[in-house]
Amino acid sequence: MQLNIKDTFSRELPSDSVEENTRRKVFEATHSYVSPRLPKKPQLIHASKEMVNAIGLDKDAINSNDFLEVFSGSKVYPKTKPYAMAYAGHQFGNWAGQLGDGRAINLFEVVHNQKRWALQLKGSGETPYSRQGDGLAVLRSSVREYLCSEAMYHLGVPTTRALSLMFSGDDVLRDMLYDGNSDYEKGAIVSRVAPTFIRFGNFELFAARNDKNNLKKLTDYTIKYFYPEIGKPSKETYIKFFKAVSERTLEMIVHWQRVGFVHGVMNTDNMSILGLTIDYGPYGWLEGFDFGWTPNTTDRQNKRYRFGNQPNIGLWNLLQLANSLYLLVEEAEPFEAILNDYKTNFEIKSLQMMRSKLGFEIEDENDAKLIANLEDCLILSETDMTIFFRVLANYKKGEGGKGLEIIMEAFYKPEEIKDLISEKWKVWFKTYDQRLTKEVLVDNQRLSKMNLVNPKYVLRNYMAQLAIDKADKGDNTLINELFELLKKPYDEQPKHQEWFAKRPEWARSKVGCSMLSCSS
Ligand code: AMP
Ligand code: MG
């Protein structure tokens, strides 16, 4: 297995001088060298051919012993030195101090077709940053990360990617429901891929310690490799850098809102400096449209990371990054201006995004009102977000009266759609129909365009759970099927029609199918 190794992070940035794998506070270093734990009996569950090619391997490499050994952590690739990154973060709005890769180990960076990829194993043992954890990951959370990150990529949402999913062969003790009932589960390892895994929290770590020297090194490194267009290190460059990160973060969150993805744990240590969706934990997909929904049981009380609050949290997290970069700039106004732009731009981009979901090409001054009215209607009776927007594309101009019939399959309780509720929907369809008369596209053209922004298939929690249950019994067929299905989320795929369905009733309150804990 030949890879074009080009390590930069660990070579150009300061490393921890201690090389013992003991849990500790690490100062003045961006990373600590650590070896992955030897898995007992690694076994490949799935590998992404696309990512295998992206890192410069032939698809046959997937079945080689080298591949199994390197991406399960059994063997370190020649002339590389795995490490865990140091970072800090704000968790649920509170400063949490040093965190770091507690169960991720970076293997190396490769360059292929002029693209840089950092590869890391998630779940391959403890590191100096493991705190109370064991550094391991279980099958259920690994399948969820593996399938979802690739699904998000194919939905057009900026995200980290996944190369492979393996059983480690080890048993891992977890209290899944946090109710005092621990049990052994199958251990698994995902190899994840991204240009870099640097997070807001990497900057916060140095800023909190007033370590300007290392903050500058990290920032200069990030700009040099990942924002090279911005320019040479200077105060002005740092401001431009913050602006670029802010724009990418906004872009990512608008995509989340478009597809109904709820991250679930938007702590600053889970915010990629590249604006990629990172750290798939207790995430979820909106089934019934609901701004107040969060999939994370740990956040059940405050719902800080609920669907409708994601844009605000993006802003809050950017403010924490601004506070860190302030140390290099020593002027607050430029940061404030960028944060204000985020708010304005969010309104603009969000409106554009909703217009596209509704099939509008031109802008009309009443669109914001029409969208707000739609959102009101969507929450009158539980309405499946994905199905609603997908079937709305079938609406034909001038058929206002048929609107409700067309979207009927999106309702979880169609029997509730009567009286006031059905009246409200009829009024909405009337305005929608009038609005469509201002558009030039004919019905078929509008349908095609809407189907490019409104996915037909998303990884509903119950789908992932079914795949997990089968894999736990040694049957990987559903992982394979969902992986293929989610490569083309906007296509009709009639043979997969069974997945274009509302969450079944049995899944409403089943563990893993609606809300999830952080236990993983
Ligand atoms: P998360 O909420 O999953 O992003 O995790 C927050 C922090 O806890 C990160 O620094 C993780 O590396 C660490 N962490 C989570 N689970 C474990 C585990 N099982 N073992 C060690 N560290 C963990
Ligand atoms: Mg994390």
Image (tube, rainbow, N blue to C red):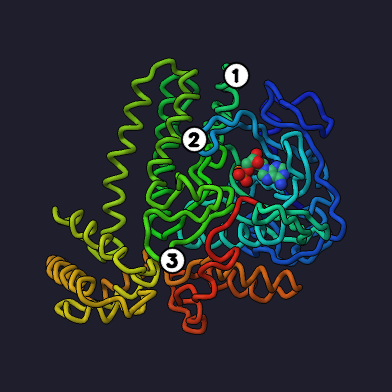
Ligand 2, seen in the image, is in the quarter at top right
**Looking at the image, is 163 positioned above or below residue 419?**
above
Closest to the observer, 194 or 387: 387
Residue 125 screen position, x and y as percent = 78, 46
- Residue 287 image label: 3
Location of the N terminus by quadrant is: bottom right
Is any part of residue 503 visible from this angle? yes
Which of pointers 3 and 2 lies earlier in the amino acid sequence?
A: 2
Q: Which residue is mark 1?
A: 209
Residue 88 screen position, x and y as percent = 60, 31
**In which image quadrant can residue 312 be found?**
top left
Residue 183 screen position, x and y as percent = 76, 58
Report how far apart the C-alphas of labels 1 and 2 lie in the structure: 19 Å
Q: Which residue is mark 2?
A: 93
Specify whether 268 is left or right of 393: right
Which of pointers 1 and 3 lies earlier in the amino acid sequence?
A: 1
